[in-house]
Image (cartoon, rainbow, N blue to C red):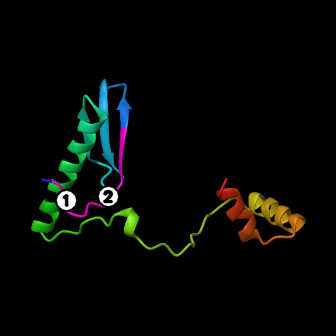
């Protein structure tokens, strides 16, 4: 079983501990699939996700929304120590930009 229109975020990585490739899904962090090849690990994790989604739907439980289709506002709050806040505000003023612009530039690097 594979999901129709599967838009979940998958990753395959080598697991030194297991001596195999691990297939992972970002939206389902508790799931994984071990296999001898990257291709088999991806097939395996996609199969597991499809089965879990089918089970969730059958039991009228919420199904995680794929990150790829989520809408983001472009806003999020970050708490930082007051001294860092002061230093960043000073840096922004010295560069003649808003604190928001400075923070956005630093996060994009």
Could you say whether the residue bearing mark 2 is in a helix, strand or loop? loop
**Mark toward the start of the polypeptide (2 vs 1):** 1
Residue in view at x 23 percent, y 69 percent: 62
Mark 2, other Cα within 10 Å: few <14 / some 14–19 / many ≥20: some
Q: Is residue 85 left or right of residue 50?
A: right
Q: Is residue 65 left or right of residue 83?
A: left
Nearest the camera: 43 or 102?
Answer: 43
Residue in view at x 19 percent, y 60 percent: 53
In terms of image quadrants, where is residue 91?
bottom right
* Residue 70, percent from left and from top: 40, 70
* Residue 2, percent from left and from top: 17, 54
Could you say whether the residue bearing mark 1 is in a helix, strand or loop? loop
Residue 7 within the magenta-colored segment of the rendering? yes
In terms of image quadrants, where is residue 37?
top left
C-alpha span from label 2 to label 1: 10 Å
Mark 1, other Cα within 10 Å: few <14 / some 14–19 / many ≥20: some
Q: Is residue 91 above or below residue 96?
A: above
Nearest the camera: 8 or 102?
Answer: 8
Q: Please give the range of residues in magenta.
A: 2-12
Residue 8's mark? 2
Instruction: Assess whether mark 1 and mark 2 are in contact (beta carbons under 8 angstroms).
Output: yes
- The residue that label 1 is drawn on is 3
Q: Main secondary structure of the magenta part?
A: loop
* Residue 12, percent from left and from top: 35, 40
Nearest the camera: 42 or 18?
Answer: 42
């Amino acid at each position: 079983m594979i999901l129709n229109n599967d838009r979940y975020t998958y990753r395959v990585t080598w697991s030194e501990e297991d001596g195999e490739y691990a297939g992972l899904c970002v939206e389902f962090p508790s799931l994984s699939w071990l296999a001898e090849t990257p291709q088999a690990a991806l097939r395996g994790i996609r199969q597991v996700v499809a089965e879990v989604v089918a089970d969730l739907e059958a039991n009228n439980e919420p199904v995680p929304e794929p990150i790829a289709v989520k809408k983001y506002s472009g806003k999020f709050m970050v708490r930082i120590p007051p001294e860092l806040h002061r230093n960043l505000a000073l840096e922004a003023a010295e560069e003649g930009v808003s604190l928001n612009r400075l923070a956005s530039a630093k996060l994009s690097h």
